[in-house]
Amino acid sequence: MQANSFAHRMNTADRAGVLNAPVNYLAAANEAPHIQIYPPASGLAAVRPAFVRQTVPIHDIRAETEDLRLDNCGFELRTLPAAFGDYYDEAAVRARYYPDVEASMLSLTGAHAVVVFDHNVRSTARAARNEPGVRTPAEQVHNDYTERSGPKRKREILEAAGLANLMDRHVAFINLWRPIIGPVRDNPLAVCDARSVLPSDFVATEIRHFGEDDLETPRHIGEIYSVIYQPAHRWFYVSEMQPDEVLLLKCYDSRTDGRARFMPHTGFQNPECQSDFVPRESIEARTLVVFDECCGP
């Protein structure tokens, strides 16, 4: 019955509220994939594994009636105005936006504690001008953490924040994604319902981050999931998204009780975007959300 239901959705993908658009999945390869990320000012393009482009139906969250929440599908749309606008000033973002994000995440998740530990600003035009710290929108389906890198980053972040006493608590990594200007039309964020993805669809991918001072030796080595295409994947986006709205993206959850744990996502080119669009600019704040529950013995 579920397969027939999905086939019906595929056959009616041109109805209101659904785009048919290409997204980039991991291509088959004989070796383990890896990614190399260089600072924007270096002029070096990121090195990424080969991809295969698949056209998929992408549903407008605004047109859906089902309950799309962090713990069932891995993402959630919220209205959340910000009393801040200086997103390209890194010091100001850390000093003034991070506390707002922390307070919002505490309220939205009911967490015991929240650590905002990083952020990315994305703008194709500003990145082309080599503005410091600005990146282009992500263009390949991925998830930010893996079964191995999630616990590792938890330890690193709690120790750096002086919160090692919370090491025994369950945690989640949740990104708060916000447009800087709106509406977002040319390169929206697509999110994949975690319930439609199998563990075998994920491929561990080493990611090497290089700093401004050394382009030969990685400053940090992490691990993300690349994703293999499956017809069952169910994609969503937010039409005409505005700066007073945010998407919460759950990229890892240490709890294994059936709730969403990993959620693939990517930017995509909107086939219905008009020629007079305003180029997308966005910011994603990365948070570690610590819950009251302990992990057990």
Image (cartoon, helix red, strand yellow):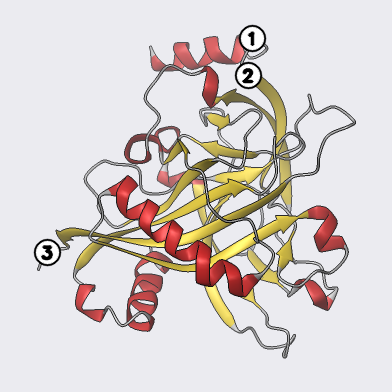
Q: Which residue is mark 3?
A: 296
Q: Quadrant of residue 206?
A: bottom right
Q: Which residue is mark 1?
A: 15
Quarter containing the C terminus: bottom left
As shown in the figure, which amino acid type bears the numbered disc 1? Answer: Arg
Q: Which mark is residue 18?
A: 2
As shown in the figure, which amino acid type bears the numbered disc 2? Answer: Val
| Vertical order, 178 against 46 (above or below) | above
Is residue 225 visible from the viewing direction of this image? yes
At x 59%, y 15%, the residue is 10
At x 54%, y 13%, the residue is 9
Q: Decide: marks 3, 1 in contact (CB < 8 A)?
A: no
Question: Callout 3: few (<14), some (14-19), or many (20+) C-alpha neighbours within 10 Å?
Answer: few
Image position, residue 201 (x, y; %)? 50, 44
Does residue 69 appear left or right of residue 230 in this picture?
A: left
Q: Decide: marks 3, 2 in contact (CB < 8 A)?
A: no
